[in-house]
Image (spheres, grey):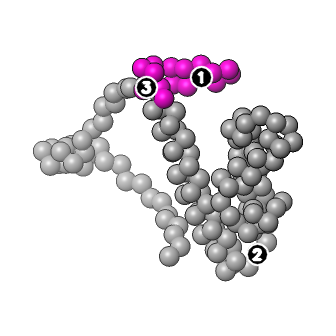
Amino acid sequence: MTATIESRRNIMRRAWEISRDAVTRYGGRVVQFFAESLRQAWAEFKSLIGQVVNLDMYSRIKALKSMKIMAEELAGEIKKVEDSIKAELDAQGVTKLTIEEYKVFWTPYTSSRVDTTALKKELPDIAARYTKETHSRRFSIA
């Protein structure tokens, strides 16, 4: 495991680093290696989780906060890549694209949902009769 992951730096940076190393070793383009590099960086990140279990409570909370920041950054990067793929599909005017072993779909759909606010306002007795109460616990760190 490298210092980049051990110091809890961004998973995406680690994935790009792995990709660049692969280009140096095998040739080609960075993006050709990126998917596998991201899997590897994620595996390294997950191995950190195993190490975290043995730490004291303060250290676990601190590590958790750090991991959540990385997850948010990774989610942002994932969204950017997804959006670029969607934009390309839109530019080509297609809803389905097959590239090698991958099939990409960007299809419109319609969903129907009950407007619970309007139902409670107009038919409160029916809304109350069909409202199901659930119980759960919320975990948060401030």
Mark 2 crowd level (few <14, some 14–19, many ≥20, 10 Å Cα): few
Name the residue tied to disc 1: 103
Give how far across and how far down residue 83 sits, in percent.
48, 39
In the rendered structure, the answer to whether residue 91 lies left or right of residue 123 reads right
Marking on residue 55 = 2
Mark 1 or 3: the one toward you = 3
Closer to the chain start, of discs 3 and 2, is 2
In the rendered structure, the answer to whether residue 128 lies left or right of residue 18 reads left
Closer to the chain start, of discs 1 and 3, is 3
Q: Secondary structure at mark 1?
A: strand
- The kind of residue on which mark 2 rests is Leu
Q: Secondary structure at mark 3?
A: helix
Q: Are marks 1 and 3 in contact (CB under 8 Å)?
A: no
Mark 1 crowd level (few <14, some 14–19, many ≥20, 10 Å Cα): few
- Res 35 visible: no
Front residue of this view, candidates 55 and 72: 72
- The kind of residue on which mark 1 rests is Lys
Which region is colored magenta? 88-105
Name the residue tied to disc 3: 91
Give how far across and how far down residue 109 sits, in percent.
37, 26
Front residue of this view, candidates 22 and 42: 22
The residues tagged by marks 2 and 1 sit, at their Cα atoms, a distance apart of 43 Å
Which quadrant of the rendered structure holds the N terminus?
Answer: bottom right
Identified at 49% across, 65% down, the residue is 138
The residues tagged by marks 1 and 3 sit, at their Cα atoms, a distance apart of 17 Å
Mark 2 or 1: the one toward you = 1
Identified at 68% across, 55% down, the residue is 13
